[in-house]
Amino acid sequence: MTTKHVLNLTSLKDQVYMYLSDQMKKGVLKPGTAINMDETSERLGVSKTPLRDALIRLEVEGFVTIHPRRGVVVNPLTLQEIRDYYQVIGALESTALLSGSASLEDSHVEKMRRLNKAMIEALKKRNFGVYYQKNLDLHDIYINSSGNRIIKMTVDTLKKRLYDFPRPKDYIREWEEESIKEHQALIGLIAEEKFQEAADYIRDVHWSFEVQEKYLRKYYLFDE
Amino acid sequence: MTTKHVLNLTSLKDQVYMYLSDQMKKGVLKPGTAINMDETSERLGVSKTPLRDALIRLEVEGFVTIHPRRGVVVNPLTLQEIRDYYQVIGALESTALLSGSASLEDSHVEKMRRLNKAMIEALKKRNFGVYYQKNLDLHDIYINSSGNRIIKMTVDTLKKRLYDFPRPKDYIREWEEESIKEHQALIGLIAEEKFQEAADYIRDVHWSFEVQEKYLRKYYLFDE
DNA sequence: TTGTGATATCTGATATATCACATATCAGAA
DNA sequence: TTCTGATATGTGATATATCAGATATCACAA
């Protein structure tokens, strides 16, 4: 969205949805936190209706649980869930790469290189918002090459759950540097049109829970 | 649910959700059909609130589109979507089989054989509800072996979208017989602990859009 | 002291009224 | 005749009031 509309046409439901997502991302709404509908609607200055609408969507997406007549809580993200999410994303991203390999051209490889480079720059400047976005953009290149809209939607939702979970102020530098190296290796394989190896690398290294586990435990604070 | 509760404690929202799902399954609510909230809430004898709650959930799951202030329509299921769904399910089911293979025992194989046999019986009796359910149960055995809850949830939702789409009165007998044969081949591979071959069979045959395309076109009436 | 029933309070669920945007129709001017 | 602005109608979005299940607390009987 590059233009800012004069009138705000975003529905209240969507605005509440975005507000709550943001609060979770910022760690204001932590796992286990109760969301009181009366208080929240009053604080936001809207009725309970768009709040409830937003919460129903957040529930379907896995972010909260609505306990009928008892309360709404923000879901924790367990290590098992992270493990599950990694496995699904790995399977779908590698499938996307393989099925979309015929569509991948030099320009895509070039673009991935530029995005990885932008990630390096962002890391130097400690601009983690940009780092995060370039990371998503890089992956989306080969995801989009498959033309499979369901893969895109599914991994987007899962990544949203992984990344919009309350995150610490700082990324883990070592992990991010490792990620960038992995991107480089992946891009190299794709450039050489070793698509099966690239797909395996996505699944067995980049999105391998076991390979990434030590960082994940640190990042999601499972080491206490 | 084997016991019928004396009091009906299912929320209206959930009852409306199930009602609408059923109407779609039965073909009463066809793709492209408009759902008028005033009329529907009146017909169901409930207010617009639980109806709207149910529709929001159905929208997130892909069944309907809520056009703000304009109307709610039942989404068509395009051939491209079916292709996308097949690819995702194939990828996830094969992943589930591979990652859960260590948990698969003779009792699981035996159970799959019994379920496939029950499918044969159901087909003879033209009892397609049972056929359908046994089919799901059979797949769920190796899906559950992975212990990956997100895989289960994802394929359940996608299958729901595929199977609860308005379906014709009759299945395609030839296709169902072919499916049963494919199950037999798959069970054979699993029994011999050829898990990689089994996973490939799931992805490249049983859930291959290209392999199943002629039946899919017939079933979903894309041949007009 | 413990257990049970009654009552109070909490909180989301639902009903109803009203709003606000989208679209169609009508009337008048050019 | 065509175009434009005003008005009417349609339909989901939102606000507000009330309901109804869940839980906590209190009082009384055993």
Image: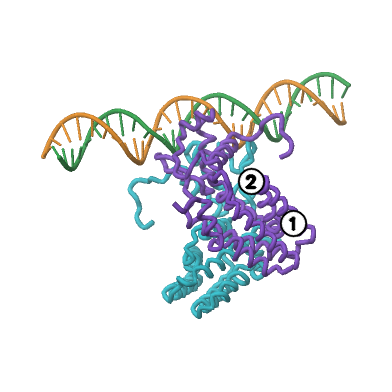
Chain colours: A cyan, B purple, C orange, D green
B65 or B80, which lies in front?
B80
Residue under the point 42% across and 40% down: B71
Image-quadrant location for residue C9: top right
Q: Where does residue A62 sit, x and y in percent of width and height? A: 59, 50
Quick one: label 2 or label 1, which is nearer the N terminus?
Answer: 1
Above or below, comparing residue B71 to residue B171 in the picture: above
Q: Left or right of B37: which side holds A77?
A: right
Q: Amino acid at mark 2?
A: Phe
The residues bearing labels 2 and 1 have C-alpha atoms spaced at a distance of 18 Å
Asked if labels 1 and 2 touch by Cβ distance under 8 angstroms, the answer is: no
Q: Where does residue A188 sit, x and y in percent of width and height? A: 52, 79
A172 or C18, which lies in front?
C18
Q: Amino acid at mark 1?
A: Arg
Residue under disc 2 on the same chain as residue under disc 1: yes
Please indicate, yes or no, whether residue A116 appears anywhere in the rendered image.
yes
Residue under the point 71% across and 32% down: B5
Please indicate, yes or no, whether residue A127 appears anywhere in the rendered image.
no
Q: Residues within 10 Å of mark 1 (few under 14, many from 20)?
A: some
**Any mark on residue B128, and which?**
2
The chain carrying label 1 is: B
Q: Where does residue A45 sit, x and y in percent of width and height? A: 47, 39
**At numbered mark 2, what does the secondary structure look like: helix, strand or loop?**
helix
**At numbered mark 1, what does the secondary structure look like: helix, strand or loop?**
helix
Instruction: State the quadrant of the N terminus of chain B.
Output: top right
Q: Where does residue B223 sit, x and y in percent of width and height? A: 46, 53
The chain carrying label 2 is: B
**Any mark on residue B15, and which?**
none
Q: Which residue is mark 1?
A: B113
